[in-house]
Image (cartoon, rainbow, N blue to C red):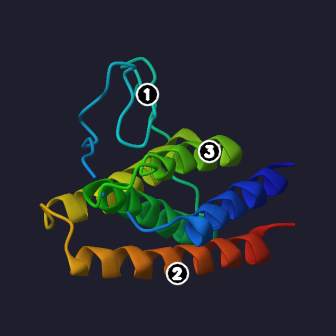
C-alpha cells in the first residue's frame, strides 16, 4: 500500500514537472511560518513534546533520490515565483502531496522538508530577479525532476 502511494506521489510530481510552463518566487525559510503555522514546504512545525525523543532517519535506498526530488521542488517553487508564474505554488503543493503520500517517519519527513527548503534557499540567496540563467535552471530542473520521478517510480515502486 505504501509503495503504491509512493509511486502515485512520484508520478504526480513527474506530471507536474513535465507539463508545467516556465515561470517567478518569494518563499519562507524553515524558521518562517505563515498564518496557518506552516513552513515553506507547507508543513506544521512540531511541538516541544514531539521533540522529546528524536527519531533517526531511515536508511531506505529511495530516500536519497526522494530528497533530491524534494530539493528540485523547492528550487522550482522559488524560481517559478521569481519569474512570475501564476501557478508557482503548485511546487509547494506537490511537495505536500509527496509527503502525504509517502507518510514517512518524522525524521525522514524533516529530512525531506529540509531538502525542499534547501533548494528554495539556494536560489533565494543567488537570484533577485528572473534572468535567462534562472529560466535555464528551471528548464534543467524540470528535466532532472521528471527523470528522477520516473526512476523513483520504476526502481522503488511495486
Image: 112 above or below 42: below
Q: CA distance from mark 1 to mark 2?
A: 30 Å
User: Tag 3's secondary structure?
Assistant: helix
| Earlier residue among tags 1 and 3 | 1
Choose between 7 and 92: the one closer to the eye.
Answer: 92
Q: Position of residue 75 (x, y in %)?
A: 35, 63
Mark 1 highlights which residue? 44
The quadrant holding residue 16 is bottom right
Q: Position of residue 45 (x, y in %)?
A: 39, 28
Label 1–label 2 contact, CB within 8 A? no
Q: CA distance from mark 3 to mark 2?
A: 20 Å
The quadrant holding residue 30 is top left
Choose between 42 and 81: the one closer to the eye.
Answer: 81
Image: 143 above or below 47: below
Report the residue at 26% width, 74% height from top: 134
User: Tag 1's secondary structure?
Assistant: loop
What is the number of callouts on the image?
3
Q: Position of residue 38 (x, y in %)?
A: 39, 29
Choose between 66 and 8: the one closer to the eye.
Answer: 8
Report the residue at 40% width, 55% height from top: 116
Circle number at residue 97: 3
Mark 2 highlights which residue? 143
Report the residue at 53% width, 70% height from top: 64
Report the residue at 52% width, 81% height from top: 143
Image: 128 above or below 52: below
Q: CA distance from mark 1 to mark 3?
A: 14 Å
Amino acid at each position: 500500500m505504501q509503495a503504491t502511494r509512493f509511486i502515485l506521489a512520484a508520478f504526480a510530481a513527474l506530471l507536474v514537472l513535465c507539463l508545467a510552463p516556465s515561470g517567478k518566487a518569494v518563499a519562507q525559510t524553515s524558521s518562517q511560518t505563515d498564518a496557518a503555522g506552516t513552513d515553506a514546504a507547507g508543513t506544521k512545525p512540531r511541538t516541544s513534546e514531539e521533540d522529546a525523543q528524536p527519531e533517526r532517519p531511515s536508511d531506505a535506498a529511495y530516500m536519497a533520490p526522494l530528497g533530491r526530488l524534494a530539493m528540485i521542488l523547492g528550487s522550482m517553487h522559488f524560481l517559478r515565483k521569481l519569474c512570475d508564474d501564476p501557478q508557482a505554488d503548485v511546487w509547494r503543493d506537490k511537495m505536500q502531496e509527496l509527503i502525504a503520500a509517502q507518510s514517512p517517519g518524522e525524521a525522514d519527513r524533516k529530512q525531506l522538508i529540509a531538502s525542499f527548503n534547501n533548494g528554495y534557499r539556494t536560489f533565494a540567496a543567488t537570484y533577485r530577479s528572473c534572468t535567462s540563467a534562472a529560466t535555464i535552471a528551471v528548464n534543467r530542473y524540470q528535466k532532472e525532476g521528471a527523470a528522477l520521478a520516473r526512476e523513483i517510480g520504476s526502481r522503488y515502486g511495486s
